[in-house]
Image (spheres, rainbow, N blue to C red):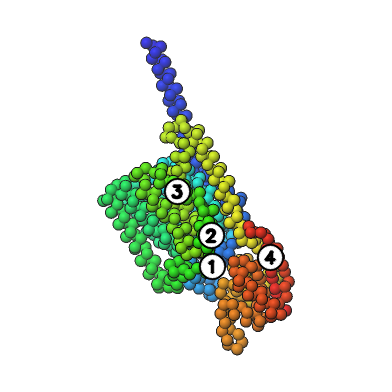
Amino acid sequence: MIEIFLDHSDQEVKIKQISRKQSFKTVTTSRWSLPLILLFQAVVSWLLLQNTAFQDEALYVYAGRQIVQHWLGAPAILDNYSFYFSGNPYVYPIIGGTLDMIGGLELARFFSLVCMLIVTTCGYYVTKRLFDEKSAIFAAIFFVCQAPVLFLSRLATYDPLCICLLALGAAIAIKTSYAKRPWIALLIGPTLVLSFFTKYAALLFIPSIIALLLLVTWIRLGWRATFVRGTLAIVSLILSAALALFIVIHYNPSMFHALTATTTDRQTEYVYARLSLVENILQLTGVSFLLGMMSLLFARKKDLLVALLLLGSALLVPAYHVYKAELISLAKHLGFSMFFVMPVAGCVLARLSGFRQRISSYGRYLFSGLAICLMLFLFLTPQATFMYQSWPPTNDLTHALKTLVRQGNGHYLAEQYEVSRYNLENETYNWQWVGLQFFQYTDKQGNYYFGNPAYVKAINDGYFDVIQLNYGYNAPTADVVANAIIQSHKYDLIEKIPYTDAYGTGYFWIWRLH
């Protein structure tokens, strides 16, 4: 009897030791998975994505610098950025401009990286709450390998901060649904309103965040809790919006024009074939949307409505761009879609990996996760590199223009005017630069010209001291300018600077007035 008792005791000790080891592995995986994924996102985006300032980066950061410098005593700002920016210039541009003044464009881009790391963390939290921790790990791996996500991680524009605030709103909504007390719902309103002011396109996703709160609360806690938490969230949203509206009406009313022109009644400048748009969307995120749709097969009955809501929210961006037949900013906006696809894709990947809830399948789970991560990385990250190399590097162009411009003396027509103006901020003033998007001109006789006729007349009058073209997406206007240069006989071609981007080799052409 004593021997039998000892045998049973030894077995119990061994079982406890094995359980402790397995528990240690599980806790270690849980504790280190997210930090390692975030580190992977930061390192990969920084190593793979290197280029000079993008047109939008230069525009927003330059505007922010001007606003901050004006607050510090510089002359008044000539541009009314509130009139045409797709987000309020007193939100992100202030942040980006301040960071640029401290540490240059790389510091502003680092802020975008921090925003996207927060998005990954929020997506992890949302997925863990809605499904389980293993789905959350897969969701985070899935998210950080998406080309639009890596692209936004290195882009100093409105989008990273906007999606960060939307992600925080979603995380607060889920937290509210699981909390014992409802008061945290009051944070949803200010967060979503701030996301809207960061970029007006956030308006598209605000109903989805509110719907997520209501749906998850109803599933977990019933109608009464849904009514209480939903009321608090909606009241906080209305009060925050009312306060913001009061401020805008009294201090920044021109924002309403920008809201209409850039978002609610946006006119497509360059109509793109809808079939080509669909092909572009499928190329960038087709696999991701396929995983999202598969969630409708894998989801449990109680999660089916949540999966439908998330998937429907993710499809808003592709639907909008196809409806408007617009390619501009599609790659950036798909990053918003990937956040909503993230939870359901993580759930599908966890199921496809063959993972079971037993701790004994730890090794298989880890191997499957690494394999899926590798496949996503190899397939999707080259697209991010292509996107980040889609605009020409301007180092050589800046060096050439620096010898031609003078502060306060001369007018410069440049196809890359936002970037050149930003790069040469210390050598020129804002009013000296003109781009190919918009131009109005009054000649010495008092005749007014607008658009292409304005460019032609100004060139014939020798108004511009330097002209730079590279025949990018404004190629039709660039052709008009080039023909006017030839016919005017007033300009000499002095530089032909080669560059290489994702589409091949091109040239910066620079003319100077006789």
**Other-residue count near label 2 (Cα within 10 Å), few / some / many at <14 / 14–19 / ≥20:** few
Q: Position of residue 117 (x, y in %)?
A: 50, 50
* Residue identified by numbered label 3: 292
Q: Label 3: few (<14), some or many (≥20) within 10 Å?
A: many
SS under mark 3: helix
The residue that disc 4 covers is: 507
Local crowd size for mark 4, using a 10 Å CA cut-off: few (<14), some (14–19), many (≥20): some
- In the rendered image, residue 266, in percent from the top left (x then y), is placed at 46, 68
Q: Residue furthest front?
A: 275
First in residue order: circle 3 vs circle 2: 2
Residue at image position (70%, 73%) is 511
Identify residue for label 1. 270
What separation in Å lies between label 4 and label 1 (alpha carbons)? Answer: 23 Å
Q: Nearer the viewer, mark 2 or mark 1?
A: 2
Give the CA distance from mark 4 to mark 3.
Answer: 42 Å
Is tag 4's residue or tag 3's residue first in the polypeptide sequence?
3
Residue found at x 45% / y 43% = 348
Q: Amino acid at mark 3?
A: Gly
Residue depth check, mark 3 versus mark 2: number of the one nearer the observer = 2
| x and y percentages locating residue 253 in the rendered image | 43, 73
The kind of residue on which mark 2 rests is: Ser
Question: Is 512 rendered above or below residue 390?
Answer: below
Can you see residue 153? Answer: no
Mark earlier in primary sequence (3, 1): 1
Q: Where residue 468 appears, x then y in whole percent?
A: 66, 71
- Which residue is label 2 attached to? 276
Q: Which of the 4 quarters of the picture holds residue 470?
A: bottom right
Residue at image coords 54%, 75%:
78
- Circle 1: element type: loop
Decide: is 314 above or below 40: below
Q: Earlier in the sequence, mark 4 or mark 1?
A: 1
